[in-house]
Amino acid sequence: MADAPKNQVLDVLIIGAGLAGLRALHTFRGAGLNCQILEKSDEVGGVWNYNRYPGARCDVESYDYSYSFSAELEQEWRWTERYAQQPEILSYIRFVAEKFDLRKHIKFDHALAEARYDEARCHWELRSTRGETWVAKTVVMATGQLSKPKKPDLTGESDFTGEIYHSALWPREQVNFKDKRVGIIGTGSSGVQMTPVIAEQARHLYVFQRTANYSIPACHADISDQEDADIKARYRERREQAKNSPSGLGFVPSGKSALDDTPEEREKIFEAAWRRLGYGFALAYKDILLNREANDLAKAFVHRKIAEKVNDPEIAKKLTPKGFPFGAMRPAVDHLYYESFNRDNVELVDIKADPIEELVATGVKTSRNEYPVDILIYATGFDAFTGSLFTPDIRGRNGISLQEKWCDGPVNYLGLSTSEFPNFFIIAGPGSPSLLSNVLLSSEEHVDFICELLVSMKGRQMKEIEALPQFEKDWVAHVNERSKETLYPLASSYYVGAEVAGKPRVFMPYSGGVRGYRRILERVKANDWEGFRFG
Ligand code: NAP
């Protein structure tokens, strides 16, 4: 990249202006680093800018899925709902960008195409898809874990005469479902969230389900002024509780095993968790995600709930997940999902039993039937964890690409740094708690850690920082060991790379919890950045 403006060397180039990238810009800038963000869209927000589908909302409570770095921001922003909807989250992110004057350091409409490490100069040369170039001492990937949408590979797509949308590439203009026959392919969190909303608007809705997943009622509620005042008065305490909970969500698992309670007591605990905890239902007992027998008890409870909600026993049976433990695949958190199947205009199509063969001009053709649709929605998820990291061509020492280095799965230290790629960091990358945690909390912790590391490098007048190969090898082994203590590996999910054919089957996130993970980061720091080499 000979045309790189070598006289303007940034301290840090951050990729992505989502929640993680904006936090990184604010924090690094505050530490005196000269930095900029490259953002592929024309707007801030990352996934919250793209996932505008009807019913999109966060399944972490608003007061926890928000930045913790500014007490003033915490007090100033007023959340209206317990689980914020996408427009409210995007407004919050825009508000943060204005309040902290972040936009002036964001280059919009530029996706990273290529990054090469220049070993002689100890810096990165980067080019965007629009051909502009940058030079930066350090690159920080804030590209998210679920940001590369995955489409089903259906023949006949070009013959289909209706409209097609992907949940994660939703248009800014409103999609009109009135009097339309709509098909949704996919029943993960996105499909589950949009189903009840579209069901109310469309003439007819077909939900094409390949794998039934679990869903827990969200128990949405508006936030009253009193509740807002109470939470804000004790915000620090709430943050501490979240930081010290296993998931960063603030739910502390009961100290009990599900096997220790009598059936009557257990029923009471499950019922209370079902009515109040949303995603935290999985933590109603300490061993639901760890012990098969305990999990079976939670499963039986949820299966009964599904049967109670769905009028037709045959449909209830199809909606009941089979073959994997409860919570091993990330459960959805819903608002009236199962109840939608009691409506006359909603039809569940089991595409495991009757697979989609192709799209035809008028709709979806399965092996046994044809379903006429005017609007087809792909709620088919993402190439998770590594999809966004492999989209640009990133090359470290000796021209090795990240994709080559990680051909058998991510190899990194602490989920944020990989050897042969000096001065290169990933926020909430594979091998860190990321998607097994409140990812915003985990991202903020990574930003602070990376910032201290960069400031330390600068203070030592060093030019390079790089993970040591032995430490990353040990870290990958540790991530694997911890996963074996859990039931997560027992489902074919994106946690194990099962969402994309041919992807290496390795356990991606760190399952040791955010508190345990933070202790490791603190130890690394206390031991003078153990596992990293300054050069
Ligand atoms: P997902 O959980 O990966 O679900 C994708 C769905 O599409 C699955 O049901 C999958 O079935 C199906 N599918 C994929 N390819 C298909 C194909 N070729 N033919 C038929 N079906 C296909 O994706 P998602 O729902 O977008 O959610 C992803 C993650 O994003 C969530 O787990 C969550 O972490 C996050 N998210 C969060 C929220 C929130 O905060 N509330 C909302 C939305 C998403 P198989 O299982 O059979 O592959």
Image: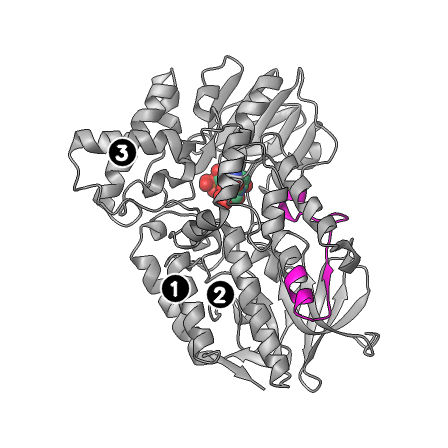
Q: Residues within 10 Å of mark 1 (few under 14, many from 20)?
A: many
> How far is mark 1 from mark 2, CA to CA?
9 Å
> How far is mark 2 from mark 3, CA to CA?
35 Å
Residue closer to the observer: 465 or 225:
225
Tell me, yes or no, if residue 156 can be seen here: no
Residue closer to the observer: 377 or 445:
445
Left or right placement of residue 161 versus residue 54 in this view? right
Front disc: 1 or 3: 3
Contact? badges 1 and 3 (CB < 8 Å): no
Q: Which mark is residue 272?
A: none
Element type where label 1 sits in the image: helix
Residue beneath label 1, please? Answer: 479
Element type where label 2 sits in the image: loop
Contact? badges 1 and 2 (CB < 8 Å): yes
Q: Residue 19 in the image: x percent, y percent?
A: 62, 52
Q: Residue at x 21, y 45 (%)?
A: 257
Front disc: 2 or 3: 3
Residue 51: quadrant of the picture: top right
Q: Residue 183 in the image: x percent, y percent?
A: 58, 27
Query: What amino acid is labelled 2 in the image?
Result: Gly
